[in-house]
Amino acid sequence: MGKGLSPEQIVRRVREAAEPVVASFGLMLWGIEVVAGGRTVVRVYVDAPAGGDVAEDGNNGEDGMLEGVSVDQCAEISRMVGLALEVDEVFADAWVLEVSSPGMDRLFFEPAQLSPYVGQEIDVTLADPHPEIAGRRKFRGPLVSASENAFVVEVLLAPVAGEKPVPSNVSIRWDWVRKARLVPVFPDTSKPGAGKNAKKAAGKGGGKQA
């Protein structure tokens, strides 16, 4: 972990180093994840802006492209951000930096990211049980709506214990969320031609160690 820094402080320092670098590639910073352990892992997710052009140095998912972000771009961003963090001496112990696109099962880091995915299935884990649904922290279902600090998911709930579950809209505040992720929809590869170019390249940049 960093020199007496909390995960939140590390995320802020990494964001300060990463945002200008990512922007210089015409990309956007989707989010930052810090996984503490024997060796701290920092994951930086970058994405092409909505409606933006794909990277110039790739053709498709099988030739170095990650949903508009190329593997080469991820590697170069990792190198540049890693150097900046080393100069700033953010980490006291061994650490690794990974840079990739958010992927088909993308994590959500703020409620504003949810709106474009209304109608798609998401997987949500709360830090504590839902205050209106005793003992339940996990929800999975179509995203019904999203606002500035809350969202609604359609899930199966039993009206009364023992009764058959029925679709119900559950409202969730963003500050209750521990993790929210998009549930990927994979192409049907049983039909001729289906799944072409669906392969996703590994998009991790070179790791850096303090």
Image (spheres, rainbow, N blue to C red):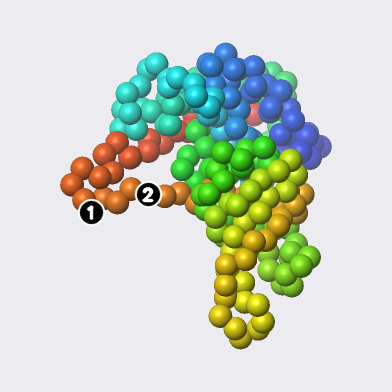
**In the rendered image, which quarter is residue 170 located in?**
bottom right
**In the rendered image, which quarter is residue 130 located in?**
bottom right
* Residue 52 visible (yes or no): yes
Residue 29, image x, y percentages: 60, 27
Residue 83, image x, y percentages: 61, 19
Q: Residue at x 74, y 40 (%)?
A: 148
The quadrant of the rendering that contains the N terminus is top right
Look at mark 2 in the image and give the residue it sits on. 186
Q: Residue at x 57, y 75 (%)?
A: 165
Left or right: residue 95 compared with residue 183: right
Q: Amino acid at mark 2?
A: Phe
Foreground residue among 179 and 92: 179
Foreground residue among 122 and 166: 166
Give the number of callouts.
Answer: 2
Q: Residue at x 32, y 23 (%)?
A: 59
The outermost residue toward the left is 192
Q: Which mark is residue 181?
A: none
Say what secondary structure mark 1 lies in.
loop
How crowded pointer 2 is (Cα within 10 Å; few <14, some 14-19, many 20+) is rated as few
Look at mark 1 in the image and give the residue it sits on. 190
Q: Residue at x 66, y 54 (%)?
A: 152
Q: Amino acid at mark 1?
A: Ser
Foreground residue among 75 and 171: 171
The outermost residue toward the bottom is 162
Compared to residue 201, the image places residue 22 above or below, namely above
* Residue 75 visible (yes or no): no
Residue 145, image x, y percentages: 63, 48
Compared to residue 181, the image places residue 203 above or below, namely above
